[in-house]
Amino acid sequence: MRIVLVGPPGAGKGTQAAYLAENLSIPHISTGDLFRANISQGTPLGRQAKEFMDAGELVPDEVTIGMAKDRLEQPDAGNGCLLDGFPRNLTQAKALDQILEEKGIGLDAVLDLEVPEEEVVKRIAGRRTCRNNSAHTFHVEYKPPKAEGVCDECGGELYQREDDSEETVRKRLEVYHEQTEPIIDYYKTQGLVVTIPALGKVAEVTQRAMEALRQQAA
């Protein structure tokens, strides 16, 4: 299957993508991984992306599209893939259609993880990270530390990252509504969108997603 995963920040896309890709035996292709791979390997597209990122600018669509196209041509993506973070806007969605059309294939589904906006804010703004080890993460409501502000693992100070502040989260949601949400309507006209509620335990959401994909493929 060839699937695009969409949803607002904090919807659990990365977590679900990993489980779904494993269950479906297809590679999980995330924008972040594409950028890291191209930059670390020093590819021409990676060098271009790094120049924009170092200047604090957004990487142009054509660079991101080029990276995605190269990745989709690798042998492991021949029988399908799960795209996470790409396409991010209408320009990228139309480019993806063209890339797949040239190969004589198309998408099977666009999986839309639905989470209420206030839940997104609560999920992200409630996160706390250890200053000693960023892998040690907690949540003021869902995974509180035993002692407030203190990491259970190493005793380090817990803090709220700047990009986890409520103000930043709401700005990220605005960008999502303006740039990414329109691709859902675009794919709805192609009959590809499958919307599932992404509240609940990780395994429950994965089960819902797998069942929805089975129905879409039927």
Image (cartoon, helix red, strand yellow):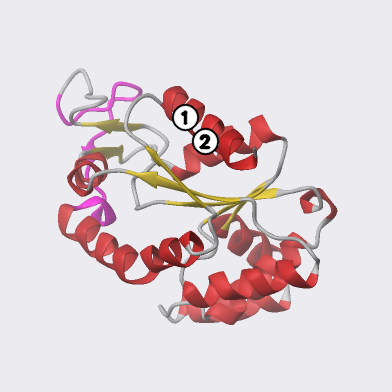
Q: Residue sitting at 52 percent across and 81 percent down?
A: 60
What secondary structure is found at the residue carrying circle 2? helix
User: At label 2, which amino acid type do we have?
Assistant: Ala
Q: Nearer the viewer, residue 2 or 218?
A: 218
User: Residue 174 appears at what percent x and percent y?
Assistant: 25, 66
Left of 116 or right of it: where is 95? right
Residue 147 placement: quadrant? top left
Q: In the figure, residue 21 lies in which quadrant?
A: top right
Observer able to see residue 42: no
Can you identify the residue that label 1 sits on? 208
Q: CA distance from mark 2 to mark 1?
A: 6 Å
Q: Is residue 63 left or right of residue 185?
A: right
* Residue annotated with mark 2: 212
Q: How dense is the environment of label 1, judged by Cα within 10 Å: few (below 14), some, or many (20 and up)?
A: some
Question: Residue 214 at x, y = what percent?
Answer: 60, 34
Whether residues under marks 2 and 1 lie with C-beta atoms below 8 angstroms apart, the answer is yes
Disc 2 crowd rating (10 Å Cα; few below 14, some 14-19, many 20+) is some
142 is higher (above) or lower (below) than 95: above
Which residues fall within the magenta stretch? Answer: 148-165
* Identity of the residue drawn at 20% across and 59% down: 170
Residue at the spot x=28%, y=56% of the render?
163
Q: Principal SS element in the magenta part?
A: loop
**Quarter containing the C terminus:** top right
Which corner quadrant holds the N terminus?
top right
- Position in image of residue 33 (x %, y %): 60, 55
Q: In the displayed structure, would residue 66 be above or below residue 169?
A: below
Disc 1 marks which amino acid? Arg
Can residue 149 be spotted in the picture? yes
Find residue 77 and report its horizontal and vertical position in percent: 77, 52
Left-right relation of 159 to 186: left
